[in-house]
């Protein structure tokens, strides 16, 4: 009987032999992350337990991204405590403006193929884009990791997802996950690993693969794993990651379900107000008026997302009455976008650009609060009622291309219709 990628990685880290779905294992963690919204309890727990040593502390990154910048004294003091802890123990630290945890960890070379990585955020599934088992845990779990280097896991079942065919121009990994949400529902893959394969995956750039793994959190996935290929290996090498240990599933691995998606025929998708799994094709709701457009977050704040928006808005202006905010996922992306002139294009069109961070994803900084009955279209990952600070507003979710096209017209819009069918042609 063969094994999945998840079974192999967890088994390797728990003694060497592949584990089986359903088993409880105690596994060695390669790298851990804790962000500022969970750091307070974690640091207090270490003090409460009276840990004499923290052998894993230098392999635990502290990231100041949610309260970026801090909106109140409590958040500011949490930042002070995190900086002091990092200085004392030698932990890697990413300060305000450096970027979002799920972007800076890969950029910083902290993980590679075959690794087991945990972080205090559900979107830690992102690391599966690099053939690593990444998953979200609580802050006190990271306290345990810093003290022991280990954590217990129940080995998840795995869903096999075959993406067949390269996405059409103007269609992105975001649209793949939204389509899956329409089929499985939110939490439809609860505590299961997703294993993505196929020509659709192979055709994706790394930015899109990161979106694919990241957005699996909305499906309830424990992890979302891709096989390693030359694109992965080249990216990891460029970011000075450790020697990769690629892991591939066996041909006779056992899956709870097999899903095939004809990605070559998939149109752009959008999730409607309040429900991330209320998903339809963008052409079905093209008359929906919008007032605000947001591009960013750990799901879609990468360079390709900003390029999509700039390609659509180059030489154009936002629709009358539409406000647009762009938040890059990291300082490196911010600088790259500046070098490429993307921010010149976007600000000339009428958009505003914020410093790298979680920004307007969950209204944690108060930078943007939606008005009553305003309709926001966002490239974020969730559209729960009141997520932007006002339960009387609406949040619709789509790709960065869909968001930019909608900002251009003032209505939910298929990007293929405003960029000649190919956003690249407008770049």
Image (cartoon, rainbow, N blue to C red):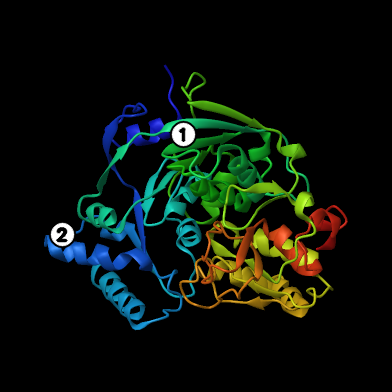
The N terminus sits in image quarter: top left
Q: Position of residue 415 (x, y in %)?
A: 79, 57
Classify residue 269 as left or right of residue 124. Answer: right
Q: Is residue 361 above or below residue 177?
A: below
Q: Which mark is residue 316?
A: none
Q: Residue at x 85, y 56 (%)?
A: 417
Q: Report which residue position mark 1 lands on.
A: 247
Q: Position of residue 308 (x, y in %)?
A: 73, 61
Q: Which mark is residue 53?
A: 2
Q: Secondary structure at mark 2?
A: loop
The C terminus sits in image quarter: bottom right
Q: Secondary structure at mark 1?
A: loop
Q: Is residue 242 above or below residue 341?
A: above
* Sequence-first tag of 1 and 2: 2
Q: Position of residue 78 (x, y in %)?
A: 31, 75
Q: Is residue 85 above or below residue 131?
A: below
Q: CA distance from mark 1 to mark 2?
A: 33 Å
């Amino acid at each position: 009987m063969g094994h999945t990628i998840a079974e192999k990685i967890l088994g390797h880290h728990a003694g060497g032999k592949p584990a089986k779905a359903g088993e409880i294992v105690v596994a060695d963690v390669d790298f851990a992350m804790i962000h500022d919204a969970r750091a307070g309890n974690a640091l207090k727990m270490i003090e409460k337990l009276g840990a004499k040593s923290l052998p894993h502390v230098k392999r635990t990154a502290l990231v100041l991204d949610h309260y970026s910048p801090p909106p109140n004294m409590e958040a500011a003091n949490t930042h002070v405590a995190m900086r002091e802890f990092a200085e004392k123990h030698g932990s890697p630290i990413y300060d305000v403006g450096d970027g979002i945890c799920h972007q800076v960890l890969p950029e910083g070379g902290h993980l590679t193929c075959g690794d087991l990585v945990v972080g205090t955020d559900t979107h830690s599934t992102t690391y599966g884009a690099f053939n690593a088992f990444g998953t979200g845990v609580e802050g006190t779990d990271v306290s345990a990791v810093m003290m022991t280097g280990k954590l217990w896991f129940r080995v998840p079942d795995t869903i096999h997802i075959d993406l067949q065919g390269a996405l059409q121009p103007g269609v992105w990994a975001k649209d793949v996950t939204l389509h899956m949400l329409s089929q499985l529902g939110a939490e439809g893959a609860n505590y299961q690993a997703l294993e993505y394969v196929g020509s659709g995956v192979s055709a994706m750039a790394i930015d899109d693969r990161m979106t694919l793994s990241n957005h699996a959190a909305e499906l309830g996935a424990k992890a979302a794993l891709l096989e390693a290929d030359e694109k992965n290996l080249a990216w990891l090498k460029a970011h000075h990651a450790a020697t990769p240990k690629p892991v591939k599933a066996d041909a006779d691995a056992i899956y709870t379900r097999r899903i095939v998606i004809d990605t070559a025929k998939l149109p752009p998708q959008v999730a409607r107000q309040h429900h991330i799994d209320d998903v339809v094709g963008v052409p079905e709701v093209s008359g929906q008026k919008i007032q605000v457009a947001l591009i960013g977050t750990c799901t879609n704040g990468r360079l390709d997302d900003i390029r999509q928006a700039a390609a659509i808005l180059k030489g154009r202006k936002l629709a009358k009455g539409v406000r647009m905010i762009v938040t890059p996922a990291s300082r490196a992306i911010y600088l790259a976008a500046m070098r490429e002139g993307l921010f010149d294009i976007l600000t000339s069109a009428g958009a505003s650009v914020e410093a790298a961070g979680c920004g307007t994803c969950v209204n944690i900084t108060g930078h943007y609060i939606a008005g009553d009955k305003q309709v926001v279209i966002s490239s974020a990952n969730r559209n729960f009622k009141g997520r932007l600070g006002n339960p009387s507003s609406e949040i619709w979710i789509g790709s960065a291309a869909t968001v930019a096209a909608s900002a251009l017209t003032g209505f939910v819009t298929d990007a293929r219709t405003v960029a000649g069918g190919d956003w690249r042609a407008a770049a």
